Amino acid sequence: MNGTDTKPTAHLPKKPKLFQTLISDSEIQSEFSHHDSTIARINNGSFGSCPQSIISAQQSWQLKFLRQPDHFYFNGLRKGIIESRQVIKSLVNADHVDEISIVDNATTAAAIVLQSVSWAFSQGKFKEGDGAVMLHYAYGAVKKSVEAYVTRAGGYVIEVQLPFPVASASEIVDEFRKALERGKRNGRKVRLAVIDHITSMPSVVIPVKELVKICREEGVDQVFIDAAHGIGCVDVDVKEIGADFYTSNLHKWFFCPPSVAFLYCRKSGNANDLHHPVVSHEYGNGLAIESAWIGTRDYSAQLVVPQVLDFVNRFEGGIQGIKKRNHDVVVEMGEMLAKAWGTHIGCPPDMCASMIMVGLPACLGISSDSDTLKLRTHLRDNFAIEVPIYYRAPKDGEVNLVTGYARISHQSSNSEKVFHDVYRLLIVSSSMKNNGQPFISAELPSWLVLMVSLP
Ligand SMILES: Cc1ncc(COP(=O)(O)O)c(C=O)c1O
């Protein structure tokens, strides 16, 4: 379920070749030498990272287009995109390449699915008051998309209130069941469930397989998994998960350039009115073909997926190895920070993938979303630390609890610097005060303070 399972996955394409030499530490450094080394980069989750060799491969595609656009359009583009779709098909264990469309990002994929729901309302297939279920922690843009396409079309939206911090996957399952019951009250039908595979903020791995099963048992028409962080972070087997739709970005945790994502649409599913929101002359030729031409633009990010797979396979254990190492490192970092801050991590390690939520001390007094933004900006502007901060509003009666959490990410592109970057956050936090009270009380070892230079 989470990013820690390293058992070999039968459907993974092109196993790392035995004769292929593994990427060395110095090669990793050189692949990511365009990263600003003065920045503590502990936020891979928002935008990912792309190696130099892939940027070069992308540039050769761009030049192919610029050199002879007609030839590229008629003989290169479609073939290249099919190759990328084939790689993704094997990576996620889809039955057929037609089930895989390449789109710009998870935001676009959500629009495709939700637009079709909106049409189902306007064409009378769904009735006013029919429901859609989504997590309270669904991504902001996806929530807006639900508002734009479902609420406006007459749908009733039920949010699943998830506990955070969360102690076990069963707490999530219980809340999900309750939300479905609410959704089905008064004979209403639940037409759609939108479920994150890994929520963004706070970041928690959701037991999607169990939730999809519950949806099937409870007669929910369609299930859409928003796995913007999926590929490269958790195991993705779309058949095993069993949803109708599954999207993942490839630019977050799979080293693709920004931006490229896929949308899997199960062939045997019951939604067939799917179209790209940008209508081109390919309209009506199937979602995968429509998505492969949405007018003149740069398609190069979508064309380098096979080269990205080769890059990933240069790491020990390929993508499985990367996931496991990222997970292990991020848990180590998270637990170290939580100990120094006297707080806790937001969920058990097996519900973290390559991101972990770490409680900030209550004395910091974070009491709103705007406080988290201020802290994030302060850390970026004054200490060159990139780290997202989450505000958790206290429940009625709760006092002096942890209200702020830092989301720490780790990706192999930063292996060489990760300890240094996280120590910088620790040292900065040790010098911070709120109303005269030190941010952390633990004395930091002098070797740590000495080894980390602050900007
Ligand atoms: C859960 C979730 N859904 C959707 C998105 C949107 O991804 P993108 O900006 O690549 O469309 C994100 C981005 O972080 C996300 O975390």
Image (tube, helix red, strand yellow):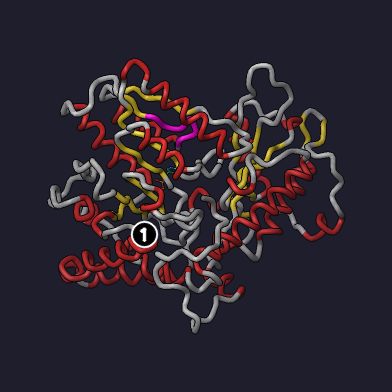
Q: Residue furthest bottom?
A: 19
Q: For this view, does 156 lie left or right of residue 350?
A: left
Looking at the image, residue 393 lies above or below residue 412:
above
Q: Is residue 93 left or right of residue 453?
A: left
Residue 120 in picture, x, y percent from top left:
21, 31
Would you say residue 137 sits in the magenta stretch?
Answer: yes
Secondary structure under tag 1 reads: loop
Q: Is residue 227 above or below residue 138?
A: below
Q: Residue 308 at what x, y percent from top left?
A: 42, 67
The residue pinned by badge 1 equals 93
Q: Would residue 255 appear left or right of 123 to someone viewing this image?
A: right
Q: Residue furthest front?
A: 217
Look at label 1 and name its amino acid.
Asn
User: Residue 63 at what x, y percent from top left?
Assistant: 29, 70
Q: Which residues are magenta?
A: 133-138
Q: Nearer the viewer, residue 355 or 372?
A: 355
Horizontal and vertical percent position of residue 267: 24, 50
* 151 sits left or right of 329 in the view: left
Looking at the image, residue 154 lies above or below residue 277:
above
Pointer 1 local density, CA inside 10 Å: few below 14, some 14–19, many at least 20: many
